[in-house]
Image (spheres, rainbow, N blue to C red):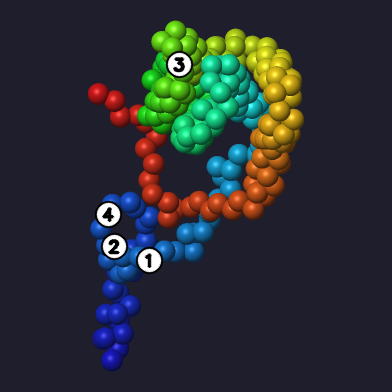
Amino acid sequence: MDVKTAASNSSPPRAKWRKVAYGGMQPGYDDNHTDETFLEGMVMNASVVKRNMLKVMLDAVSISEYLCIVALVVLVWTCTLSSSLDENSLFSDSIWAVTVSLLILHLFLHDYSESTVKAPGALKNPALTSCISVNASVVASVFIASRLPSRLHVFAIMLFSLQVFLFAPLVTYCIKKYSFCLHICFSISLMVLTLSFVYTLHRLLFVLLLSLLVFVNLVCPYWLIRIQEYKFEINGPWDEAKLCFDITD
């Protein structure tokens, strides 16, 4: 008995467990073993960005700006069609339903932080969703042009629509890059101008557009700030490894 006790006491101690990514199983420990230091590296809300209400509202101005641009295009379409067609021909088919659906798709996929065409000095090309957005606006313009009575009307409305949908985002992007204050002033002026035109055309549309702009610039930023309080993110040693360098050819 004493010999066995002495032999057991003289056996080498178990090696200390080490946290390694790819080292295989360590003798004396299970593959999923963790020690008391496992939770010391836990970090909560490490990548959560604290947003400022005013900054979010200013960022939302770009969305309202482009909504007004699209609204002005629709006003031009409506005035052109109403001056060329009678009321029954203007609203008797599904052209407007398809056009509105395409414009909603255009607004949903539009990249409000970049340009629809590659701006001078830009490092990357427009995203695929931005290209789909432009195509949707072009198809909507074609549907509207198909209702016009002459080739001259078709040429004018297509030229106008293409210039606006292609180059208006580029102009607003360049203005924003040049001066953010100028961007804000231009956006506010555009919103006032659009609302005044819509008001002279139809009071109900004016209320709808005004409500939409208030929703985008006030309600949505407020919601974003409020729901941020409920965001809870936990990071720690159990996260997958992330490369700290770029792999380039």
Instruction: Tell which tag, 2 or 3, sits nearer the viewer.
Output: 3
Secondary element type, mark 1: loop
Image location (x, y in percent) of residue 235: 50, 51
Image location (x, y in percent) of residue 157: 48, 14
- The answer to which quarter of the image holds residue 130 is top left
Amino acid type, callout 1: His
C-alpha separation, residue under disc 2 versus residue under disc 1 = 10 Å
Mark 1 crowd level (few <14, some 14–19, many ≥20, 10 Å Cα)? few
Q: Are marks 4 and 1 in contact (CB under 8 Å)?
A: no
- Direction from residue 198 to residue 239 in the image, left or right: left
Closer to the chain start, of discs 2 and 3, is 2
Secondary element type, mark 3: loop
- Tell me the residue at 38%/55% (across/down): 19
Image location (x, y in percent) of residue 226: 69, 47
Mark 2 crowd level (few <14, some 14–19, many ≥20, 10 Å Cα)? some
Which residue lies under the disc numbered 1?
Answer: 33
- Tell me the residue at 60%/51% (across/down): 231
C-alpha separation, residue under disc 2 versus residue under disc 4 = 8 Å
C-alpha separation, residue under disc 4 versus residue under disc 1 = 13 Å
Amino acid type, callout 4: Gly
Which residue lies under the disc numbered 2?
Answer: 26
Which residue lies under the disc numbered 4?
Answer: 23
Closer to the chain start, of discs 3 and 1, is 1
Amino acid type, callout 3: Pro
User: Residue 149 shows which numbered tag?
Assistant: 3
**What is the number of callouts on the image?**
4
